[in-house]
Image: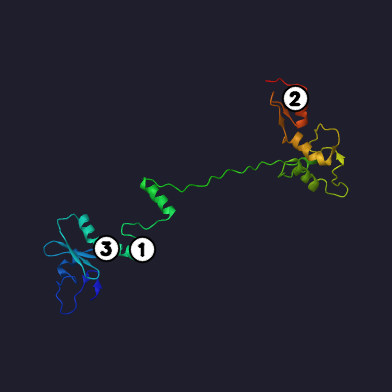
Amino acid sequence: MSYNPYGYQPSQGQSGTQRGSSYPASNRENHIPTIHGHMYQDINGNWVFYSMDGSDSQNISHQQPYASGYTAADSMGLLQQNQYRQYTGYAADQSIPLDASHQYYSQSYDQGHPVDPPQAVVFPISTTRTRCTWGGRCGQELDDTSAAGINRHLKEYHFNTRDNPWVNSQRGRCLWDPNCRSHDPIKYENMGKHIAEVHLKALRQICPDCGGSFARGDTLARHKREIACKRA
């Protein structure tokens, strides 16, 4: 027995109306293919379903709506699906598990509108950095504006020659700002602290009583000790 798009053809000697093997040639143009077999109208106007292997048939009344008839004809496929689930370990009423992304999109579409997956929030990185103005010609960006970080920069870029070595106890003038009011020489080891406090305001101290700003903690302490502010 062979298969063609119009159904199964009988072998020689078999009747053309044999149940489960073929259907009349006059009705071949009225067949409806399904995913599991074919349907055709018999001489009484009823729809008959034939499975692919020709082993099962089912009469479907022509009075039924097409949608219900198609569902009834396709019920054979549900049997095969249940058999597949039993074979693979899934219960007949158990859905095959889906991954998280599929469930997410299914929920979104069930609500009537697709929603993109949540995106990680990326905050902009500040590109503003303090540049060294030592001697008025450096311009190097500082990755660390603490006292230790500034000292490290001065050692690497400005006190790195035999004629001008870095010596912690040696004193020198601050060249960060030509208008620096520190006229007294400063120890090299304290140069970073001076720049951070006075020029960068990194260690700025605020008076809790009057809100005044002071570059150094000792200046704030003297201010409070001398009661030079208007206390709240």
Spatial separation of the CA atoms under disc 2 and disc 3 = 91 Å
Label 3, on which residue? 79
Q: Amino acid at mark 2?
A: Lys
Question: Dot 2 corresponds to which residue?
Answer: 224
* Disc 3 residue type (three-letter): Leu
Please state the horizontal and vertical placement of residue 98, each as a whole percent of the image. Answer: 40, 56
Q: Residue at x 44, y 53 (%)?
A: 101
User: Callout 1, which amino acid?
Assistant: Gly
Camera sees residue 109: yes
Question: Disc 1 or disc 3, which is closer to the eye?
Answer: 1
Quarter containing the C terminus? top right
Q: Are marks 1 and 3 in contact (CB under 8 Å)?
A: no
Q: Secondary structure at mark 1?
A: loop
Count of all numbered marks drawn on residues in the image: 3
**Residue 30: image tag:** none
Tell me where residue 227 appears, x and y as whole percent. Answer: 75, 21
Identify the residue at image location x=80%, y=46%.
Answer: 155
* 188 is higher (above) or lower (below) than 12: above
As drawn, 185 above or below 13: above
Q: Quadrant of residue 48?
A: bottom left
**Secondary element at tag 2:** helix
Task: Give the residue at the far left of this rendering.
Answer: 44
The first of marks 2 and 3 along the sequence is 3
Q: CA distance from mark 1 to mark 2?
A: 81 Å
Q: Residue furthest right?
A: 163
Q: Which residue is mark 1?
A: 89
Tell whether label 3 touches label 2 (CB within 8 Å).
Answer: no
